[in-house]
Image (cartoon, rainbow, N blue to C red):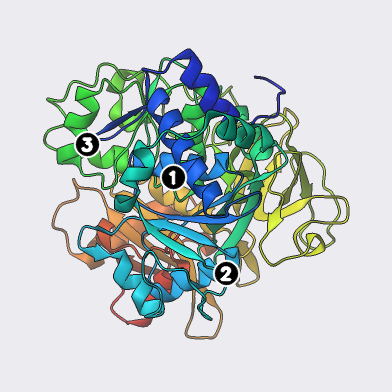
């Protein structure tokens, strides 16, 4: 498939022909084969066409990870629609805003999950939003239908006209919009990022080798499908490779470990924190995860095959690039001298590093803002003109700070909107975080700037302690952390404000990123150390 521009309908049909009995998605209590995916999504595509869905119609999907999600999303894609994955974490005002921003016309949702009533959330937006109605509501003016997944049983059991489905599939082209995926930085307002079939699938395919994914793999990724991490590096990666995706709507070690053991997982990707939490679970030692192979996160691998910190590439990507655009094979350590890098830029992506002040390109080894250009990048952002998104010569300013070395390895320093000055010197929070993560007492660390007594900025660190840390008083522990940090950082980069927090209490945004403003508010409470 190298170099070929693909579509979701084409891939669904291909694998249904070649391996109809192989699972594409497996959950703790269900499984969906490639053949079932083709049949059910075909029935749903015909249904969507019958209710007026066509090329470019925006179809929202408000559902947790499971076998139903790809049936709805791929059914909409086969009808020519643009899929709008919606976070199940959204509160009613946030959901209304995203429905408006993306111009969602048809919404498919599950009724509830873990006590959360999504129909009630819609009613909170407007009492007129009633499932099954034809809608004309000012707060969501484009929304026309709302359908509960549980009500689609008769549709999924129907046999659509084969000639209609064939014609629908053939009408979907690589240049057509596949999805609008919402993202935001750790400080920003969510934005709807538009990706085409050809661009999103090519961007995903470019990273398959680095992520070591093959047709024979059973890949575990718990990231929600409504984020690029779950949609691209999970679901679409499995679809491209013809592999099987193991996923969960609510990962918890007590369920995840037997699930992975029972399903003979071969690759464990996703959140490093989740892998570390599994490894700390009392049941981990007894779990048989011998089916895992190199390329999985180190925390769940045998100690003798784990790499030292910085020896494996950290994949670098964003929603605007539809996932990773730089990396290195995850079953290999980085070459000598390239430790700590994000590997090399993938095919069809051009990275330019520009001076933060002049905007001019800089030489290899010099730090600046990373800009991206290439055919697999997003098509645009909802509500913004091309001139507002791209430079005159077609580059996208990522806001990331870093440099390329002479061998093309990419090193990330931080975020442009996160960097700050302390006594006239620049501090990159990610650099300080890396130093703190190297301390044995620290499991996770987050660094922000806070206002100092004299009006200037201070370096503040929010720290989740390692499990092995004893009951030493907070003041003594912080003294030790600060002393250790001084051995690794210039004095102006060492945190002067510290806040100890439990892992579950780290403030997060609705797009799954650490909430930097929320971290800063912790220090407003005055009970930091």
Q: Disc 3 or disc 1, which is closer to the eye? A: 1
The 10 Å Cα crowd at callout 1, few under 14, some 14 to 19, many 20 or more, is many
Q: Residue at x 54, y 75 (%)?
A: 457
Q: Residue at x 52, y 86 (%)?
A: 454
Q: Is residue 365 above or below residue 189?
A: above
Q: Which residue is mark 1?
A: 72
For marks 2 and 3 on the same chain, the one whose residue lies earlier in the sequence:
2
Separation of marks 3 and 1 at Cα, in angstroms = 25 Å
Can the viewer see residue 5?
Answer: yes
Separation of marks 2 and 3 at Cα, in angstroms = 40 Å
Residue 411 horizontal/vertical position (percent): 63, 41
**Quarter of the picture holding the C terminus:** bottom left
Q: Which residue is mark 2?
A: 142
Residue 218 horizontal/vertical position (percent): 36, 23
Toward the viewer: 437 or 262? 262
For marks 2 and 1 on the same chain, the one whose residue lies earlier in the sequence:
1
Q: Which residue is mark 3?
A: 256
Q: Is residue 141 above or below residue 81?
A: below
Residue 294 horizontal/vertical position (percent): 40, 19
For marks 3 and 1 on the same chain, the one whose residue lies earlier in the sequence:
1
Q: Where on the picture, by quarter, is residue 210?
A: top right
Separation of marks 2 and 1 at Cα, in angstroms = 20 Å
Toward the viewer: 457 or 279? 279
Q: Disc 2 or disc 3, which is closer to the eye? A: 2
The 10 Å Cα crowd at callout 2, few under 14, some 14 to 19, many 20 or more, is some
Can the viewer see residue 244?
Answer: no
Residue 139 horizontal/vertical position (percent): 51, 79
Q: Tell me the SS state at disc 1.
A: helix
């Amino acid at each position: 498939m190298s170099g070929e521009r693909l579509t979701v309908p084409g891939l669904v049909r291909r694998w249904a022909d070649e391996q109809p009995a192989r699972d594409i998605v497996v959950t703790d209590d269900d499984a969906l084969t490639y053949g079932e995916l083709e049949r059910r999504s075909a029935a749903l595509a015909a249904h969507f066409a019958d209710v007026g869905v066509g090329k470019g119609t925006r179809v929202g999907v408000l559902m947790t990870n499971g076998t139903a999600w790809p049936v709805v999303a791929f059914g909409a894609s086969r009808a020519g629609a643009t899929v709008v994955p919606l976070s199940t974490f959204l509160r009613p005002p946030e959901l209304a805003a995203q429905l408006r921003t993306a111009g969602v016309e048809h919404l498919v949702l599950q009724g509830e999950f873990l006590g959360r009533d999504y129909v009630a959330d819609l009613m909170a937006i407007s009492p007129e939003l009633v499932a099954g109605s034809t809608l004309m509501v000012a707060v969501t003016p484009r929304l026309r239908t709302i359908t509960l997944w549980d009500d689609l049983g008769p549709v999924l059991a129907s046999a659509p006209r084969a000639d209609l489905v064939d014609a629908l599939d053939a009408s979907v082209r690589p240049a057509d919009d596949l999805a609008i995926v919402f993202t935001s930085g750790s400080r920003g307002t969510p934005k709807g990022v538009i990706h085409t079939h050809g661009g999103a699938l090519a961007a995903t395919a470019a990273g398959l080798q680095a992520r070591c994914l093959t047709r024979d793999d059973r890949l575990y990724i718990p990231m929600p499908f409504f984020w690029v991490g779950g949609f691209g590096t999970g679901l679409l990666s499995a679809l491209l490779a013809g592999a099987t995706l193991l996923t969960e709507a609510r990962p918890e070690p007590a369920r995840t470990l037997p699930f992975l053991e029972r399903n003979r997982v071969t690759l464990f990707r996703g959140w490093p924190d989740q892998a570390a939490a599994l490894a700390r679970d009392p049941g981990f030692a007894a779990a048989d995860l011998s089916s895992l192979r190199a390329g999985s996160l180190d925390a769940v691998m045998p100690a003798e095959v784990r790499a030292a910190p910085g020896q494996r590439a950290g994949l670098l990507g964003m929603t605007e690039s539809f996932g990773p655009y730089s990396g290195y094979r995850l079953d290999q350590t980085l070459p000598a001298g390239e430790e700590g890098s994000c590997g090399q830029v993938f095919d069809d992506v051009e990275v330019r590093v520009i001076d933060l002040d002049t905007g001019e390109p800089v030489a290899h080894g010099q730090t600046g803002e990373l800009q991206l250009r290439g055919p697999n990048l997003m098509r645009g952002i909802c509500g913004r003109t091309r001139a507002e998104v791209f430079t005159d010569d077609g580059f996208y300013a990522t806001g990331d700070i870093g440099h390329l070395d002479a061998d093309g390895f990419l090193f990330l320093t931080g975020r442009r909107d996160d960097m700050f000055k302390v006594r006239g010197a620049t501090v990159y929070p990610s650099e300080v975080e890396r130093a703190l993560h190297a301390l044995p007492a620290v499991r996770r660390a987050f660094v922000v700037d806070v206002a100092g007594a004299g009006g200037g900025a201070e370096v503040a660190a929010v720290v989740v302690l390692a499990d092995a840390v004893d009951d030493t008083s907070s003041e003594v522990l912080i003294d030790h952390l600060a002393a250790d940090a001084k051995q690794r950082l210039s004095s102006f980069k060492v945190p002067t404000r510290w806040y100890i927090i439990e892992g579950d209490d780290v403030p997060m945004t609705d797009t799954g990123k650490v909430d930097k403003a929320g971290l800063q508010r912790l220090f407003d409470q005055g009970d930091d150390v």
